[in-house]
Amino acid sequence: MDWFTASEYWLSRLVFQRALAAVYLVAFLTAAWQFRALIGRRGMLPVPRFVGRVPFKRAPSLFQLHYSDHFFAFCAWAGCAVSAALLAGLDSLLPLWGGMLLWLVPWVLYLSIVNVGQTWYSFGWESLLLEVGFLAVFLGNDEVAPPVVVLFLLRWILFRVEFGAGLIKMRGDECWRKLTCLDHHHETQPMPGPLSWFFHHLPGPAHRVEVAANHVTQLVVPFLLFAPQPVATAAAALMILTQLWLVLSGNFAWLNWITIVLALPVVRFPADAPDVPGAPLWYVVVVLAVAALLLGLSYQPVRNMVSRRQVMNRSFDPLHLVNTYGAFGSVSRVRHEVVVEGTRDDVPRADSDWREYEFKGKPGDPRRWPRQFAPYHLRLDWMMWFAALSPAYADSWFGTFVERLLENDRDTLKLLRRSPFPPDEPPRHVRARLFRYRYTTWRELRETGACWERTFVREYLPPTRLAKTAQRP
């Protein structure tokens, strides 16, 4: 069945699979190291409480059948182990059906995590990893050449990621149409990186070029993915370069990296294809059936893309098989940050010894330079950015977060860079205040050594303490 496979893409498939396994590994490590404080039994949004009110059909997950922190940890670390095995190429050593089953394991495990992750797992790159990971199951191994239909569907995902993001910008904030959004974005993005300060201080014309190039890459280049070679390879290469530029300019978890991974199967690497037997009939039937299902499910995402009321980052089925994507339809002009502080004083006053909690990634101390964390995802830091936009984003978890700080909860403190209180001396009161942050100028940086300048805006949460029945002696 020569029509079914494209042997010239065998190296593209190999590079894609190893890169996808690496992204899976980062995602499972993020889950393993953070889940107890976020969604564990004593987490801010516990899984047992969630599965008690949400039925299996709405959120299919292994944790609907059984949950304990030990079982979640087992699943997360098992995902790490399988991802590492796929990264090492174990799927190539198995028969075709065995390789497919091996790729199915991380998809099932990560789907189980995402579907009970609630707010902490509501980001578009979670669904994107699941959608791409599901297709990877059917891409085959060394026993068969890459199936054309799966390669096409991977391009279809990449098209929707880029074109959907381009449309949401053109329909959204007018600064995208005026080419001025990057006058603000590098300063107000969720989690700046070590180079974001320098990107912000690029000349105005350079920002205009950045935005214009982004529009071309997202609104024109995606159509070239379906052109003959070498045009398709050139289009994918341009997308990869654009994503690498975004990697340098901020911390967007693995969003940029999974997009780069998606572009890899489009690239036709110059290498001689190995001789492999034809695809077995059962494999052809399975792949074609899955392709028909996914194309049918694409109706809702396409309808959303062409709608004037286009929404970003939404799944249309509980398995996250086909989704809609997009980012930064609007850009904030002002950066606000929630600063969390605690004191040991029994009676909190304005002049009490308030000590600031330091987060790993989000801005805090104006003199502390941002670090690079992506593709690792600091979930709490990201949600603190949303909390600063509106307290409504934090209604479901911020109170519990403060309670855990008052308890000096070990798992919660692991999410932070540093706690100002010793393990045996928890704070008696915790408060939160809202500050406006702006990048310093070149002159201010030289004079003060600070990359941020912050100004108090208002109280976010008044001094709070544990209920008397819950206080430690």
Image: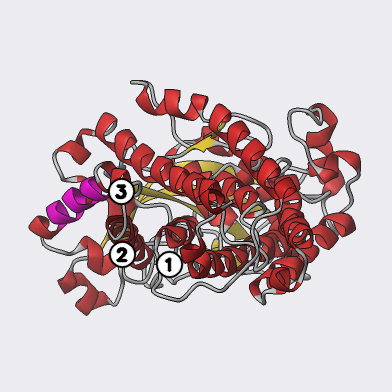
Quadrant into which the C terminus falls: bottom right
Judge whether 87 appears above or below 378 on screen.
below
> 286 or 362: which is nearer to us?
286
Name the amino acid type tagged 2.
Leu
Marks 1 and 3, the one that precedes in the sequence: 3
**Residue under numbered circle 3:** 227
Q: Residue 115 vs residue 219: left or right?
A: right
Q: Residue 214 vs residue 306: left or right?
A: left
Q: Secondary structure at mark 3?
A: loop
x, y percentage for residue 103? 71, 58
**Residue under numbered circle 2:** 241
Q: Secondary structure at mark 2?
A: helix
Residues in magenta? Answer: 207-218
Query: Is residue 251 in view from this perspective?
Result: yes
Residue 389: which numbered mark, if any? Answer: none
x, y percentage for residue 206? 12, 60
The residue at the point 71 percent across, 53 percent down is 280
The residue at the point 26 percent across, 41 percent down is 219
